[in-house]
Image (cartoon, rainbow, N blue to C red):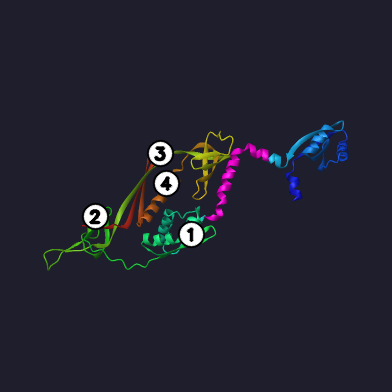
Amino acid sequence: MQDLRLKLKSAFTVDVTGERPERFLNAAAAKGIYISEARPIEGGLRLRLSRAACRIMEQDLPEGLDMRRVREHGAPRLLRGIKKRYLLMLGAAAAAAAFAGFSSAVWRVEVSGGTPRLRAETEAFLKEKGLVPGTLKRNIDQNAIKREAILSIDDMMWLWVDLKGATAYVRVAARSLPPKKLPTEPANVVARETGVVESITVLDGAAAVGELETVEKGQVLISGLIPSERIEEPIIRHARGTVTARVWREKNVIIPKTREKRTPTGQSRKIRSIKIKKFIVNFSINSSILYPKYDRIRTEYKLGSLPVEFIVDEYAEVKAETEAVDVEAEAARVRAEFEKEIADSGAKLVNIDEKREDRGGGTELCLTAECLTDIAAETPM
């Protein structure tokens, strides 16, 4: 405690220079003045004195000596600095008020159990009901959430909310549903896209096309009307099946010959501010950006449901240059993206043809992919 009082007490580091600086120590000792951290420097001594001791020695300094205050220490200097930064004080006060309610609020919501779809629906339901990071615990009605969740979410059997510390653990269980009934309403199977039929598998209905036959988008592939030899009217069914066809898909892009390259110079500046509802307080006295070109990265720290945000904007200076585009590398990237699009659609890639044409400012890349895919789509009659 004694060390803390000494650190908070107002004091100065002073330099004493001149002829025989040790006379200063003798004079101070004669006046009963306490001196700490005394050490020699070029041409004199550097030591620490209290504010009152500085005034006494300045008034009765031994002849031939010079005393200069180098640095101030203690609580008064700190308080003067904070007083000038009134915006910082406002931000600190807002932060203190925000964090005061940390222990009485939920800052993390974990949903476990059930299926991925059920967990996603539960998270959306909890957000709608206000159970989100920052919600005060006293505002959470666990029994009401359980009842409404079971009534609102079809696949849910039960839900349990357990509050531990700053985390809300939500556990769910999916309802066991009976097997899905096959549709019985009349329907045909039509083509999703144009192609050449490779194979056809009929689960219900009658095949309307054959293998190696070219079909157009929307054409009937499996009919829900089945001819009958015993009755005049055809039998009406819900047609089902798969039709694998060879299809062709295209992708055209223009690859520019040059592009702008932005290189960080290493110079950056951060501007901090606090947003309370629509009112923004800037911590920086000078917020002007003198960089001719820069990239801005904004980081926002939200305090749950409270209308308070801490904002940090980092402005990084960049140097913009024009560089030539590697056409081969860019074409390879576009081709890889095209192949991924085909794979994500469920189609099997057979072959890709590539053509390039010069378009002045760039190169037009034309990709034609040959694929095998199921083009069957059920549609009501």
Reading the image, the residue beneath label 4 is 331
The range drawn in magenta is 79-105
From the image, give the main secondary structure of the stretch colored magenta: helix
Q: Are marks 1 and 3 in contact (CB under 8 Å)?
A: no
The residues tagged by marks 2 and 1 sit, at their Cα atoms, a distance apart of: 53 Å
Q: Is residue 59 left or right of residue 173?
A: right
The answer to which of marks 2 and 4 sits earlier in the sequence is: 2
Q: Is residue 308 left or right of residue 233?
A: right
Q: Which mark is residue 208?
A: none
Q: Are marks 2 and 4 in contact (CB under 8 Å)?
A: no
Task: Rate crowding at label 4 as few (under 14), some (14 to 19) or many (20 or more) other CA atoms within 10 Å.
Answer: many
Reading the image, the residue beneath label 1 is 110
Q: Does the magenta stretch include residue 101?
A: yes
Name the residue located 73 percent from the left edge and 38 percent from the top edge: 72
Q: Where is residue 71 in the image (x, y as percent from the top left)?
A: 74, 38
Q: In this view, does 227 lie to the left or right of 31?
A: left
Q: Residue 214 carries which label?
A: 2
The residues tagged by marks 4 and 1 sit, at their Cα atoms, a distance apart of: 43 Å
Q: Residue furthest front?
A: 138
Q: Position of residue 134 (x, y in %)?
A: 50, 52
Say which element carries label 2.
strand
The answer to which of marks 1 and 3 sits earlier in the sequence is: 1
Q: Nearer the viewer, residue 140 or 243?
A: 140
Q: In this view, does 72 lie above or below 124?
A: above
The residues tagged by marks 1 and 3 sit, at their Cα atoms, a distance apart of: 50 Å
